[in-house]
Image (tube, coloured by chain):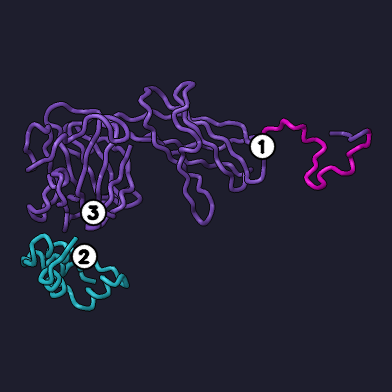
Chain colours: A purple, B cyan
Amino acid sequence: MASISGQSTSNIDNVDGFFTTQGGSGTASLSPTLTIVGTPFGGNVTISNFSSYTNPNWQVEVFVGATRIVSNAQVARSLASDQLTDFLSWSDTSALTGVRTVKVRAQTFGDFVQSAEVTGTYSKQVVSNTYMRIRGVTAAGADSSNRLGMRNVRFFEGTSQSGTQWASGNMTSNTNPTSNGVTLSQGHLYSTTYDAYKAMDGSGSQAWLLGASTANNWWQCQFTGTVPTIKSFLILMTSNADTSYIRLQGSNTGSFSGEETDYGVYNIPNNNTTTNIG
Amino acid sequence: MDYTQEQIDVAVEATSAMCFILHVTGEVYCDAVMVAMQLSHDQDGVLSEKDRLEITSLMP
């Protein structure tokens, strides 16, 4: 704005927040790097290279085509040293197929102007394997001897723990009833009191890998008939567990010697409450 | 989870009174006490030699 009521503003530029050349329609530039990871049950993005912004807040939305499937309010933020981190994650429960487009804008606190939009894409993973394995890992995802202890594990063909459930009923052994369509096992057995099927028997007992090593700290569900497409699952980890992180893996051979598909690491608090994923 | 006096006594004996007290008062978490309590509960106060070895391996 060059003048106000005919008086030049040249001497009051940048005084009390008044900018004579603001123009009112400016759009801040942004050229960050988006590192996007798609998981079976959601996605996450790590944003880097945004040095022109100081501790910005991020607006993140996810689309399939023109349909928004994740709003900005549904994107989870985390704090580190009292600042929002540049790692954001979301749950992707949309039944739509196709590539997901992640749209990101930055806005510095106190600034009314959002940056230009930057986009990236990811594909949602499909989980459909004969063998599903849950492994105890560290927060960083490394195999760990920190034992699993699970009172309940269920897989679902629908999102948000809906649709057909596996195992559909409660197991009475690692293989029975066979009509449930699963065979359970684990890499280490402390005693039969804590066998694998205890995580699917509907009781208060648990599949507990007490004394497990880094190599054998896993629990497995084999689908013996129809192999379902898994869109969500739940775990109740007991306080007897020594880990709060699991890695979900899938294989069609059961070998898990490199042919398996990695479905990501999940934080499952060992606090006797059910954690829903997907 | 409810415990009988016998189950608690066995867990204390398999660990130590000091560890047990510090654990249950929340002052020092002791994995051995937690495991001993669970095993003692599930086996109604009977710990095998294997149980005791496992508990001992978890003692601080």
* Magenta run includes residue A13: yes
Viewed as shown, does residue A153 lie left or right of A58? left
Residue at 32% across, 40% down: A277
Q: Secondary structure at mark 3?
A: loop
Q: Helix, strand or loop at disc 2? A: helix
Q: Mark 1 and mark 3: span between their CA atoms?
A: 48 Å
Q: Chain of mark 3?
A: A
C-alpha gap between disc 3 and disc 2: 12 Å
Where does label 3 land, which residue? A238
Q: Is residue A146 above or below residue B15?
A: above
> Is residue B54 left or right of A242 when viewed as pictured?
left
Tags 1 and 3 touching, CB below 8 Å: no
Q: Residue at x 16, y 38 (%)?
A: A221
Q: Which residue bears the numbered disc 1?
A: A113
**Chain holding disc 1:** A
* Residue at screen point 59% across, 39% down: A106
State the SS at label 1.
loop
Q: Tell me if residue A199 comes above or below residue A130 in the rendering.
A: below
- Residue A111 position by quadrant: top right
Q: Which mark is residue B34?
A: 2
Amino acid type, callout 3: Thr
Marks 2 and 1 in Cβ contact (< 8 Å):
no
- The percent position of residue A231, horizontal first and vertical second, equals 29, 32
Principal SS element in the magenta part? loop
In front: label 1 or label 3: 3
Q: Amino acid at mark 1?
A: Val
Magenta-drawn stretch contains A257: no
Q: Which residues are magenta?
A: A6-28
Q: Are marks 1 and 3 on the same chain?
A: yes
